[in-house]
Image: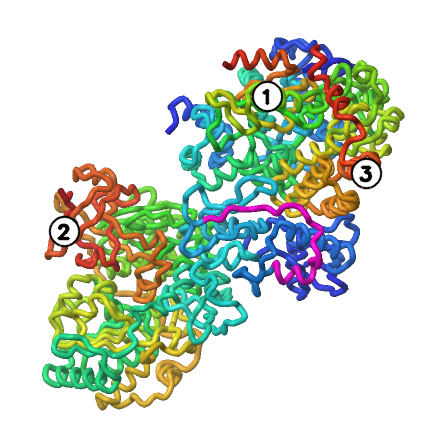
Amino acid sequence: MLEIEIDGKAAQVPDGSSIMDAAELLGAYIPHFCYHKKLSIAANCRMCLVQVEKAPKPLPACATPVTNGMKVFTHSDLAVKAQKGVMEFLLINHPLDCPICDQGGECQLQDLSVGYGGSVSRYREEKRVVIHKDVSPLISMKEMARCIHCTRCVRFGQEIAGIMELGMINRNVHSEITSFVGKTVDSELSGNMIDLCPVGALTSKPFRYSARSWELQRRRSVSPHDSLGSNLVVQTKHDRVMRVLPFENEEINECWLSDKDRFSYEGLNSPARLLKPMVRVDGTLREVDWNTALDYVSHGLKDITGKDGGDALGILASPHATLEELYLLHKLARSLGCGNIDFRLRRRDFSADGKTAGIPWLGMKLAEVSDLDAALIVGGFPRKEQPLLAQRLRQAAKRAARFSFLTAGGDDQLIATHARLNVSPADLPKALAGIVKAAASLKKAAIPAGLETQEYCANSERIAQSLIDGEKTALFLGNMAEQHPQAALLHALAQELANITGARLGFFGEAANSVGAWLARAIPSGHNAYAMLEAPRKAYLLFNAEPEFDCHNPRLATAALKQAALTVAITSFKGGAAMEYADALLPLAAFTETSGTFVNTEGRAQSFNGVATPPGEARPGWKILRVLGNLLGISGFSQNSSEEVRHEIFTSGPFVSGLDNRIKDIALNLAAPSPVQGQLQRIADVPIHFADPLVRRAPALQLTRDASAPAARIHPETLEKLGIANASKVRVRETDGNGEALFVARADATVPAGCARIAAAHPASAGLGDMFAAIRVEGVR
Amino acid sequence: MAILGAINPMLTAGLNNDDAGWHLADYEKRGGYLMLREILQEKRPQEQVINEIKKSVLRGRGGAGFPTGLKWSFMPRSFPGDKYVVCNSDEGEPGTFKDRDILRYNPHSVIEGMTIAAYAMGANRGYNYIHGEIWEIYQRFEEALDEARRAGLIGQNILGSDFCFELFAHHGYGAYVCGEETGLLESIEGKKGQPRFKPPFPASFGLYGKPTTINNTETFAAVPFILKVGADAYLEAGKPNNGGTKLFSVSGHVNRPGNYEVPLGTPFSTLLEMCGGVRGGRKLKAVIPGGSSAPVLPGEIMMDTTMDYDSIAKAGSMLGSGAVIVMDETTCMVRSLERLSWFYHEESCGQCTPCREGTAWLYKIIHRIEHGAGRAEDLDLLESITGNIMGRTVCALGDAAAMPVQSFVKHFRDEFAYHIEHKKCLVPLEVQRAGSGFFTASE
Amino acid sequence: MLTPESLQKIDREVAKYPTGQQQSAIMASLAIAQAEKGWLAPETIEFVARRLGMDPVAALEVATFYNMYDLRPVGKYKITVCTNLPCMLTGGVDAGEYLKQKLGIDYDETTRDGKITLKQGECMGACGDSPVMIVNNRRMCSHMNPEQIDKLLAELQ
């Protein structure tokens, strides 16, 4: 520890602290622009110059290490003169256009210029002109003359996003921030650069000119998208959500947000919002009042379950729904004698049901991910599926943690990688078994039954070794491992590997409330999410789900819903396929319009309140279900608030109990059908901006590169074998079943040979079936 | 260009401005690589080499004048990982052109000096960063490296010993700021040459984050000679605290501009005489004694000064890199400063606020004054702006841009005031034009 | 994109640096690419960046920072004249003016026949030889009085 005195206040700070760190500890404010606690030190703005005893010159607080006994003066004449000098330099070329600047009112430069700027400018020369840029549908770079060259955005790209998309080109006073000639900024974390920009150079394109910061009301909320449950500040004006910013929570999202979390709010204000209940009368959906609609739905459900039993009903719920909603759905199902309720809509293999010890979860706290020494990630595309979890892995990898990937589809996760195995989905279990076998051999442990003849490669051994060597190690199953047709086998193999190496086993988790849905018991005692579509039901109840995009097999789902006598969709949106298959649409309040709870992948229950009134006649889900329960004459539906519902599930937090990833009694049967000549295996990822109904309707996000229409991405050699030219049109047919769809073929060396990567959850692929089905790809014309 | 004169030369002894005499064989004939051989044969302790350099009071020839032996002693010699020795041949300080001649006529002296330095500091890899504009010299150095490599003087197991040192040349591409040692390191790393803030210093966090020592070309070139003549003799060649001889690059209004190797402490008047005096017998007006970043001094002050670090400092300037820019009475001081200020503004890396914004502002004001749009308050404003730049920037370029402005205005304030008041120069344009000699002289 | 000879030269530069530090070769690689192509088009910069495993914008930073790279097409010959103070004192600026007048162009312009581009340079480290200029970044010409300039222009025509 080092002794330091700042402006007469003494403190002890750890070795290696900077003056800025010490000042923060002491609560002394030192003005700054380029310094940011999460970014490397640039020391380029020079605003944080302070006086240090015995130093002849003022020193930058951010870059000056504390020495024992150091005395610092942040407001001495020397310091203030230096700070004012810097402020003058910052302002001479800055357009003093605060009244028309979008940053006005929340601008660090504006704030500090009040304290350190002059009232008159001594600068009487021409000001710098900087040409505007158009690099993103999310970030506006229209007024780059405002830039003060702090390079926070550049460092963010290099250090946090893992990809340098903005740079500072040229030199001297002509330095300017830009992307590479003609290139866009595509990082899934790009919006954070807006927050980081201390001036009005980078502003939010969707938000620009729509409100002043002081007109906005700020409320806390929780993101309904990925499994982290990032903490939000939702800002509203006249009851309309205008903007979403991160609420800093070091244990979850730190000070960041993914672009999905940040910009999906636009979907809340979508013209596709369902504002009134609708009911199909004489084959046509008509707007009706709530009483009519509820009457219709309750009678319909009562009739069918009364006549054909609860088993005639299937309930498909979204894992993006709240804990309270899912719990009431569970209660509703049970009271109707219906065991067919599930939230695991993209799952294919349910053979683990009944064989797991508890609720699948991350297996550790999110913050612990940052401290890992080594991990193996099996399946999935974490950068696009859990962007901020991937960000934690990226930072850990920088300080020498060894992360390996076993995937089908080798997207660059922008994480320094120890070893990578990129195989077809069908080969995933074998490849994992190889690592298990390698680990057993290295540890001289017993070979698990079924793996006696399993072979493994040098890379498998490297991976196994890294898990054995590390002290804090983990084994993560990504989304693909959960959606995989042999998910249980992958789970069981991972369990074996964890047993042998001592690594902790965890699931990244698909959605904001995947853990909560387990807790709410929105899981089947009868047919699971796939089976209830495979064996069509008479009636379906859909909660915040669009099966044509959200289910493992959209073709199967659409067919089942269409044949049903009654399909009730409790949803925030109208339009699309639902207008054909639904018989009743009940307008659902979105996450900002209701209170509720999400339990994230580390098992943290986060409750939130509504921040805006639901539009039109939309109502919070828990209220809709409560009234429906009443109308069906079921007991246990008398709650007066979402808190009351939650208290039925658990009372104390913040972490829920029952989390356990262990699995048993799964035979390690690795026999796989040999690939058929001419067939390819589909790899279906869920594109980041298509993963749930809300984000699918966020216009700016839909303009990003991540939202571009899916292609059939095929390894160039496979493409050549098929005799198909890159960028040509192809027809994709399923080998079992009659699904087909048209795509453009793209040569992509990251796709394993013999596979075609075709995204799911998109209208273009909604005509296809299983996510990992065997397919044929043929040229068109 | 050439080495046009010397008094008791060391570095340039035996050189005769001959483009053929730079080869390994020639250097060895002049006694080259003897010291390296001796050190490796004797397995001389590293400390002994460093102490010898310390004792010679060799001060860095790049401009800062930091004692070389002391700098070497900062390197963690026993640190087991990679360590680097880097030579700064990014000679772009206006007025300086000595390193180019060293590399042109005696490249092996730099290679030997760097190899000895690497031995002394336990470094295993080195780079010589060569100024972008001198491609031909870069190529020559590459050839010299090939010669040395073939002869086993650099590379693995040098001269059969277990000492290994890989040495390469890195070619700059036009950025003055890379002459700043950490800007240079960034540049070798393949980035913009933006200087790093210090601490940490290169000795602990240098090239690729590894311990690194950077010295100027002339500094390295002096090393074999110091070891050959001995530290005491070297020190004595100069004057106390200013050891040895120094190459002075004399440019501007002298009859024979070029490089001159003279002992530190030689009177300026002697040096001027060696250059054939002021061109056309005109009156000496001003001298920048240490490269464009050093404060300008009026001619009469210079005539009373000797050429060494301490005396020039006492006179109010800096010896810097030993670049002596001589200006006679045909020189317009406003126009001269305008050009220098353009240079610093142009070469500012753009990283830190006071330099990026301040250098451009300074230039704009001086440009206005030169072009008849000066304002009465401009001189005070210049003074104030330079005060806000100096000591507030990441690297020394800010100070380098400010000092000429301060000194020009201080010593020639009347001339600036005349410009502002009369919208024209004290020195008639045709006199200025004649002063350059472009249309009259052809030597 | 680049000839095998250029790629070979780039590989030679990469070999100068420790494993994993191939970015160090960006300056030399861009110079090699420029020597082949005449100037650095965005696609050339991107190609070189990818080859060295860099984000393209990082290479663009480098290409725009060092002033000997040409990010716009230049003439067959680029003459860069040093006009910095020591050179100015002994004819550097005059030499530039003389060239402008002879070629009928200003700095940063190219003659109509596409032959010669004129640039103003900063200190080339050859002040004693003033006036100095470099042709195509490679060849330094010293003591360039009017006669010498005439000779050079005749040679380049």
Task: Tell me residue C80's x, y (percent).
Answer: 58, 24
Q: State the mark number for residue A31.
A: none
From the viewer's perspective, is C114 left or right of A766? Answer: right
Q: Amino acid at mark 3?
A: Ala
Q: Amino acid at mark 2?
A: Arg
Task: Tell me residue A27's x, y (percent).
Answer: 66, 66
Residue for badge 1: C101
Q: Amino acid at mark 1?
A: Gln
- Marker count (numbered): 3
Report the Cα–Cα distance between label 1 and label 2: 71 Å
Residue for badge 3: B417
Q: Is residue B330 magenta?
A: no
Q: Is residue A116 magenta?
A: yes
- Among the 4 quarters of the image, the one containing residue C154: top right
Please tell me which residue is depicted at 15% across the width and 75% down the height of the picture. A284
Q: Are marks 1 and 2 on the same chain?
A: no
- Dot 3 alpha-carbon crowd within 10 angstroms: few under 14, some 14 to 19, many 20 or more: many
Chain letter of disc 1? C
- Dot 2 alpha-carbon crowd within 10 angstroms: few under 14, some 14 to 19, many 20 or more: many
Find out whether the residues at labels 3 and 2 contact each other: C-beta distance under 8 Å.
no
Camera-side residue: B299 or B106?
B299
Please tell me which residue is depicted at 78% across the width and 57% down the height of the picture. A77
Q: Split into 4 quadrants, where in the image is the N terminus of chain A?
A: bottom right
Q: Split into 4 quadrants, where in the image is the C terminus of chain A?
A: top left
Report the Cα–Cα distance between label 3 and label 2: 86 Å
Residue for badge 2: A733
User: From which residue to which does the magenta span run?
Assistant: A109-133
Q: Main secondary structure of the magenta part?
A: loop
- Among the 4 quarters of the image, the one containing residue A47: bottom right
